[in-house]
Amino acid sequence: MSNPQDNPSQLDLLSSALGSEELRQLRFMLNKGLRPAEAARLLEKTPPKERQILWNLLNKENEGKVLQHLGDDVQADILSRMDASELLLVTEGLDSDDMADVLQQLPERVMKELLRIMDKQNRKRVEKLLSYPEDTAGGLMNTDTVTIRPDITVETVLRYLRRHNEVPHSTDSLFVVSRKDSYIGTLPLTRLLTADPQVMVREIMHTELDGIPADMPEQEVARLFEDQDLVSAPVIDEHGKLLGRITIDDVVDVIREDADHSLMSMAGLDDDADTFAPVLRTTRRRAVWLGINLITAFIASAVIGLFEATLEQVVALAVLMPIVASMGGIAGSQTLTLVIRGQALGQIERANIGWLFNRELIAGLLNGLLWAVVVAVVASVWFGDTTVSLVIALAIVINLLAGAIAGTLLPMTLKAAGIDPALAGSVLLTTITDVVGFFAFLGLATLFFG
């Protein structure tokens, strides 16, 4: 099956079909020709008006399957057009964790109404998941599990499984629990199928895999799956009781969302933002960070204003001034990105931050000296003034050191304060390198030129 990302003609087909009203072919493509995830991607890269037409062409039994693959922003927009009864039909048949994810996109009033009209069993499962923060193991888990006792034979387990029409998806192991549902271990399906039918479960089960605490952050869950090559893992409460399981597809979603978050937050954008969101919504979201950036720009301008008399005396300073701020900003951004990535991967702790700080400081000094010489030579040839060359060389060294210091310490400080470093770090870093760069450059110029 081709991927719509690799086959741009599908979007052309969509535009053609919408334009010529050849909707029968389009309906077939959405419901039969594409997998749910592919149909979701097609919806996400379609402008709002055409997107609604596409959604209406989906068969009712496919709506829920497509909905769970949509980004939060697009998902919320589609859900906002439905009443509780429509939502119940759409979410019917979804796994409990996917249903909980959908409900978290709804206004509280609509969510309560939807929970009220659910059947008792589904309501109990979903409410259990909603009781945990969505960025923890409890929020990721699915309550659909297959459990067995340790004091039964392999033959009994096989008879038990044959009574089911199917097992939950991504089931690679059965969870072994006590009579009080306390997690004991796992029984891989591969071992189950090759074991002697008369062997007891306790003799062949694995006990190496510990249960994942329900309050474990999702990033730690993802690292655990990566380190141990897991396909599924049990989730337990503080008493060791089995609550549910996390599967590899949930972890892949976490990894993808973290990557999107890191990329988009560096620009002050929402990682689940709809690429084709309406103009007013897009404008409103971007205006906040543009406003913050404007405030920081005024701070940098105020620093320049302090040295107005010096700038009037030496025109070359105004020409060269942006170079100092730019070099410091780039050097700081390199360090900032490295540290934020290290935080996301769990590689940076108090024990090693000192080593990293020293490394970045030395790298900033060496790069500062290297490029200070280059810029000084260019400035000397350009303006024929050795004093200007010396001023800009010293300012570049100072600002690259400032960028290294800020790039290392800002993420740590922001994280300790409970602020997302990816979201606020770049704005603050730009302010610091601009202010330090301008102040160093113009301050030294005032000192040298009197």
Image (cartoon, grey):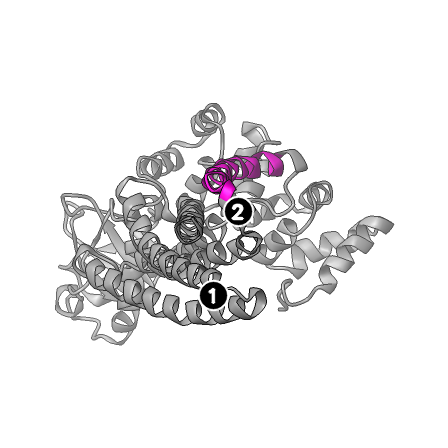
Q: Residue 69's x, y, as percent?
A: 53, 51
Q: Residue 194's x, y, as percent?
A: 26, 76
Question: In the figure, 381 relative to 244: above or below?
Answer: below
Q: Amino acid at mark 1?
A: Thr
Q: Residue furthest right?
A: 20
Can residue 327 be spotted in the picture?
yes
Q: Which residue is located at x 49 percent, y 57 percent?
A: 326
Q: Which residue is located at x 25 percent, y 63 percent?
A: 356
Residue 311: mark: 2
Q: Is residue 273 left or right of residue 182?
A: right
- Residue 403 in the magenta stretch? The answer is no
First in sequence, mark 2 or 1: give its number.
2
Q: Quadrant of residue 398?
A: bottom left
Q: Magenta residues?
A: 281-309
Q: Residue at label 1?
A: 386
Per the model, the C-alpha gap separating discs 2 and 1 is 17 Å
Q: Amino acid at mark 2?
A: Leu
Q: Residue 392's x, y, as percent?
A: 45, 60
Q: How many residues crowd around disc 1 within 10 Å: few (fewer than 14), some, or many (20 or more)?
A: few
Question: Which is more toward the observer, 158 or 382?
Answer: 382
Q: Quadrant of residue 246?
A: bottom left
